[in-house]
Amino acid sequence: MADAPDKPVYLLTGSDRPKIETALTRLRKHFVAESIDVASALDTSGESAVALCNAGSLFGDTRLVVIEDVDGRRDGDGRRKGGWKAADVEAVGAYLTSPAPGSVLALVGEDVKKTTALWKACAKAGRVLEFAVVKKSLQAWVAEQFRQRGAHAEPEATLALIQLVGDDPHSLAAEVDKLVTWAAGEPIGEREVEALVAPVAELPVYELTEAWAARDAARALDVSETTFERESRQRRDIAPRLAGALGGHLTRLRSVKRLAEQGIGSKEAAERLKLNPFYAAKLFTQAESFSAEELHDAVVRLAELDGALKGQSRLAPDLEIQRALVDLTRRPGTARAP
């Protein structure tokens, strides 16, 4: 995108919003500000976008029309709504068979698929730029954001940032900017991230599982209550997700426990289980604090929790979660709560 645009249309898509914004900034530099139109597909049809392209510019020979949200925008529940329909894409596709010579159309979406008519039309008439962040490489991506800004963040800090903010690259980049400004050249650790970053991720599971590994019942209960309070959904809807997260973590704990007993280290285990190496090392540390029998008992307890959440108990789902946490964090040899 550093070279002058020579295509009538550019489709920019992917989860790496910071890179998309960088590409748009570079594209804008080739046009005078007065000849740039920016609109959203949420309220601008395909026909209207075509009309903007055909309108020409009074301030130069070329015109840039940027249409955001072509595949809609996520609502509070994470569902994508709005965006262009088939008729809108058809209008743009027809325009691209004979585009206005003085106009460049830039279409922006988060998750435009290669199989869609819009992708195919843009690839045929212009250029598609996909900037995606692979979730399994998200921690490395965050670390790179710190490096690009001349800052050093410890691995614990990058992981904590993801756990607190979630996997949205745009939000992560904004928090990286804030942390780098505050650090003023000093190293950034987990403590600084936890102190400065407001938790917005839907499910801070790592805090819960670390409290579990530390057998800190009070902390586990506090984290679970914070989770219930933070989310907009009903508690009865959150409880199964929380139970599922605990179950998934337990499965990984048992897997690394078995591998450790076979003499396999965390790095090799990470490759076998397709886990982030840093996360795998944390799992190994946590697994050391549990015996195989305790992990087996945890499987039984979580199975009981699953049954309770599916109607075998008259207690509220959030209370069942908290009762299970008390049992999971109790020390060996102590009696289980009635």
Image (tube, helix red, strand yellow):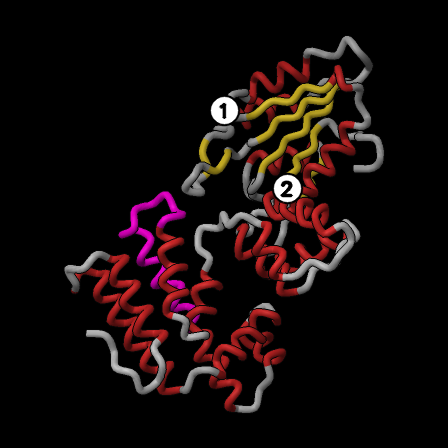
- What is the x, y in percent for residue 187? 73, 59
Q: Nearer the viewer, residue 105 or 191?
A: 191
Q: Quadrant of residue 136?
A: bottom right
Helix, strand or loop under label 2: helix
Q: Name the mark nearer the viewer: 1 or 2.
A: 2
Asked if residue 236 is among those painted magenta in the image, a careful observer would answer: yes
Q: Nearer the viewer, residue 156 or 284?
A: 156
Helix, strand or loop under label 1: helix
Give the residue number, with chain letter if any, for mark 2: 17
Is residue 101 at all visible to an observer of this figure? no
- What is the x, y in percent for residue 145? 71, 51
Is residue 295 at all visible to an observer of this figure? yes
Q: Main secondary structure of the magenta part?
A: helix
Query: What quarter of the picture does the C terminus occupy?
Result: bottom left
- What is the x, y in percent for residue 25? 75, 32
Residue appearing at x 60%, y 38% in the figure: 119
Query: What quarter of the picture does the N terminus occupy?
Result: top right
Residue appearing at x 60%, y 24% in the figure: 92
Vertical placement of residue 294 versus 214, above or below? below
Going from N to C along the chain, the mark reached first, 1 or 2, is 2
Q: CA distance from mark 1 to mark 2?
A: 27 Å
Asked if residue 23 is among those painted magenta in the image, a careful observer would answer: no
Q: Quadrant of residue 313?
A: bottom left
Q: Residues within 10 Å of mark 2 (few under 14, many from 20)?
A: many
**Left or right relative to 97: residue 280:** left
- What is the x, y in percent for residue 178? 66, 45
Residue type of the residue flagged with mark 1:
Ala
**Left or right relative to 324: residue 88:** right
Q: Write down the region rendered in magenta.
A: 229-250
Labelled disc at residue 87? 1
